[in-house]
Amino acid sequence: MSAANRQMHLGVFVLGTGNHSAGWRYEGATASNCSWPVLQTIARTAERGKFDLFFISDGLATDPGDHPSFVSRLEPMTLLAALGAVTRHIGLGATVSTSFGEPFHVARAFASLDHLSGGRAAWNVVTSTNSAAPLNFSRERPYEHDLRYEIATEFVEVVRGLWDTWDDGAIVADRSTGTFVDASKIHPLNHKGRFFSVKGPLNIQRCPQGHPIIIQAGGSPPGQELSARSADLVFSVVNGDPAAAKSAYDSLKQRVVKHGRAPDDLAILPGVMPIIGETEAQAKEQLDRLQSWLTSTNALTLVSQRLGHDISGYPLDGPVPEFPQTDRGQAFSKALFEMARREKMTLRDLYNITAAARGHWVIYGTPQRIADIFESWFTDGMADGFVVMPAYFPGAFDDFVDKVVPELQRRGLFRREYEGSTLRDHLGLARPVRAPERKTA
């Protein structure tokens, strides 16, 4: 796509209690992550705003001291299947871990969602870092970082291979001859690897998108390699520093090319929490009010999770300690440490920011200022769009859809109408042909 015709992509990160840790306390905000009316309304609002993607994360453990939306949440594939019946265009993305499951299950589930939604499914590939999750799956601890990504790389390879075990048109259903299926168009996978052995074929015909969209968010070198090789969409972590964002953007695009793909085959969308007001002062007042509801206990828990180190014993008004890199959330910890050093932050400063958006970038201002920032990052080659993380629902998301989206549309940066029916259409990605190496399998 030429630079003149390039269009921004927008996704919404959905947490029923709001992306801000205290968002559910805001007047008129929803306070449930398991409410069908709430989630249905968010999806319809996103579709009204012509968003590319409705995205819901997942986790496999719970802690009462965690972010409110992470304490209780719906199984995402069940939710997305239901949302597919009440929406027509919006892409439907969910997190499913490669550390607790089997490729056959994941391939089948997302192919089913793609069929049911008419080609709108997206899988967010994660390797799971929560130390409590293995205890729910007969294991004592997570796999170490590099091993997790080795497993994930093979896992994704198998899933994509299973999606390719059917040719288009394999179901014939010819009443005159009595032929229901053309067996020559269904192929075994016969995968035997280090971690998985899967014969195949998948027991569901090729889905509308060929392959559902693959999302990745890993920022470590193994995570970037997985993204460059296999992902269609990357949720990146940025801290507001344009130089760092530009360097990371260019580096990942270069990795994509090294894997024989075009740079536009991968869209990079930073996560950002926009706080919107009629004036700068109103927006700042809203952010200050949200921040005033934070508790040091919850904030310190979140910061410890993002940094991979327990910081509860350090003085809040002292400098951010120097910690070695850990296996947990390397992209987040890197972004937070870089921001803390650049801004000379105290630990209190850092936990205020981290608790606001779990380590993602927070911006505030008028709709015009928010649009200015989005336009600058988009046109200067630091992002292909954004994952919008409203502080609370529905008000903060309504503000973005009703005030910022029209401004982006006026500037010619974002669609006014959907031009296709599938998520691949929205992202400008071609439907993949069946992998040639599978043809003789």
Image (cartoon, helix red, strand yellow):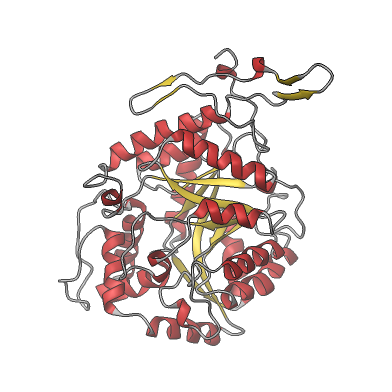
Indicate the position of residue 241 as horizontal and vertical percent values.
43, 61
**Left or right for 311, reference 196:** left
Residue drawn at x 61%, y 56% is 82
**Left or right for 415, reference 294:** right
Relative height, residue 302 to residue 126 (above, below)? below
**Left or right for 59, reference 119:** left
Relative height, residue 368 to residue 124 (above, below)? below
Seen as rendered, the residue at the extreme left is: 313
Seen as rendered, the residue at the extreme right is: 176
Indicate the position of residue 183 as horizontal and vertical percent values.
65, 17
Quadrant (top left/top right/bottom left/bottom right) for the C terminus: top right
Examine the rendering and report whether any part of residue 278 can be seen. Answer: yes
Nearer the observer, 401 or 74: 74
Q: Which of the 4 quarters of the picture holds residue 35?
A: bottom right
Quadrant (top left/top right/bottom left/bottom right) for the N terminus: top right
Q: How many marks?
A: 0
Indicate the position of residue 354 as horizontal and vertical percent values.
36, 69
Q: Which of the 4 quarters of the picture holds residue 110?
A: top right
Nearer the observer, 147 or 440: 440
Residue drawn at x 35%, y 45% is 220
Nearer the observer, 143 or 40: 40
Q: Which of the 4 quarters of the picture holds residue 2?
A: top right
Nearer the observer, 20 or 171: 171
Indicate the position of residue 196 as horizontal and vertical percent values.
38, 27
Examine the rendering and report whether any part of residue 382 can be seen. Answer: no
